[in-house]
Image (spheres, rainbow, N blue to C red):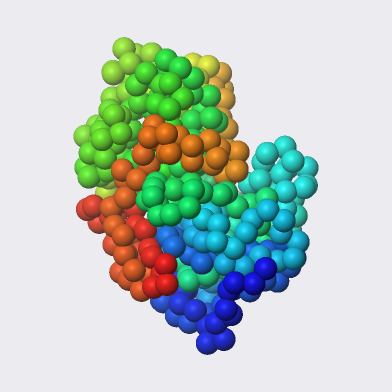
Amino acid sequence: MKGHTFQEDGVQAVVYKGPFTVAVEEVPDARIEAPGDAVVRITTTNICGSDLHMYEGRTNVEAGKVLGHENMGIVEETGPGVAWIKPGDRVSVPFNIACGSCRNCVDGWTSFCLRMNPAEGVDGAAYGYAQMGPYQGGQAEYLRVPFADFNLLPLPAGTEYERDFTMLSDIFPTGYHGAVLAGVSPGDSVVVFGAGPVGLLAAHSSYLRGASEVYVVDMHKDRLDLAAEFDAIPVNAADSDPAEQIMDATRGLGADRGIEAVGYQAHDDTGQEHPEMVLDGLIKSVRARGRIGVVGVYVPSDPQAASENAQQGRIGFDYGTFFQKGQAMGTGQCPVKRYNHQLRDLIIAGRATPSQLVSHELPLTEAPGAYEKFDRREDGFTKVLLHPANA
Ligand code: NAD
Ligand code: ZN
């Protein structure tokens, strides 16, 4: 089905050039390459904390890659094998690219699709991301989406809830996944490390699952204030050991559940990285038999890590205490499709408001400055939404 006029001169996109440099450049337009593909005109695309790992040169992403895995827009064209999605549909694009028919996809684990990533030994693919396959990102005017019928989530037509729906491609399901991996159930107390977008939506999701109280740990005052806006109890790691603050607040018992929303670049309040410090903090502040959900990213190879072990993904956390307390840990990339339609309907029903954390809406052309300020976690730069010129 035709609708998209292929732009021979190319289209504008955010391109990774090298550490701490992205540029808005002309790149080849998206086109139908396989029968199941769709081309989506991007209306909103977000910068993610995950993009910063690449921006800081802490991945092996190649120069020239178009970034952007948090995408939504309007379908412009579909391949001959697409039966249900139609040009004109408003859609959210999960960051996972999944075939829909391998064993892991059929089980609902699209984040570990066995087919879409050609890299040896890596299951799971994504748009515009290191190690996640040859796919270009959506911080661009148009995006090619493989297996569109399976991957795309239909949204109500129009422009309503754009700022909420744009969180459905990644961080809202990811925050929710953290709560699921931690086993958050009605009445639970929960501690979330990290008050970035993922941590804030892990807190929001924990309340949606019935938590009685949620603590959120960070050292950035502006982000802790946002946590309070999501009804969480802010814990400032710059004041004193956050795990001890949680133990005091829970009468020495510890929280029932813990969520890791920081990742391998965890650091102290001077900026010095200690990749084990958040895992240790969770093991200390979650009660015996409690579960911990880790959605902050850890990687098997990090050549620029401070220690030789961490360079090989060997994170020396307190496994002894973890075992002694009989705790359990769930990890990994979020299978967005498992949760995105339920979270969409909670938004429409007015029960979920992930847009509360949006700090900036900018034209795509302003991406380079936005990356720089978001990377410095500059005051007020929490979540940046980008709009291409033709949005
Ligand atoms: P972000 O970088 O904006 O947020 C991370 C927050 O952690 C920051 O506010 C930072 O101050 C805080 N932090 C750092 N060290 C800390 C410490 N020792 N104690 C407490 N807080 C600390 O990023 P984000 O967008 O919220 O993403 C968070 C993590 O989730 C990243 O690692 C990202 O790659 C990952 N992520 C994972 C998935 C998935 O599918 N599993 C999806 C999206 C993002
Ligand atoms: Zn993301």
In the picture provided, is 144 more to the left or to the right than 264? right
> How many labels, in total?
0
Residue 288 visible: yes
Q: In which quarter of the image is residue 136?
A: bottom right
Rendered residue at 32%/50% (across/down): 358
Q: Quadrant of residue 194?
A: top left
In the picture provided, is 243 more to the left or to the right than 322? left
Rendered residue at 34%/41% (across/down): 195
In this view, 301 is above or below 343: below
**Whole-percent x and y of residue 122?**
69, 53
Rendered residue at 21%/42% (across/down): 221
In this view, 296 is above or below 120: above
Which one is nearer the viewer's eye here, 330 or 316? 330
Residue that extends furthest to the bottom in the rendered view of this protein: 9
**Whole-percent x and y of residue 118?**
73, 61
Q: Quadrant of the C terminus?
A: bottom left
Q: In which quarter of the image is the N terminus?
A: bottom right
Rendered residue at 36%/74% (across/down): 365
Residue 52 visible: no
Which one is nearer the viewer's eye here, 331 or 95? 95
In the picture provided, is 338 more to the left or to the right than 199? right
Which one is nearer the viewer's eye here, 351 or 23? 351
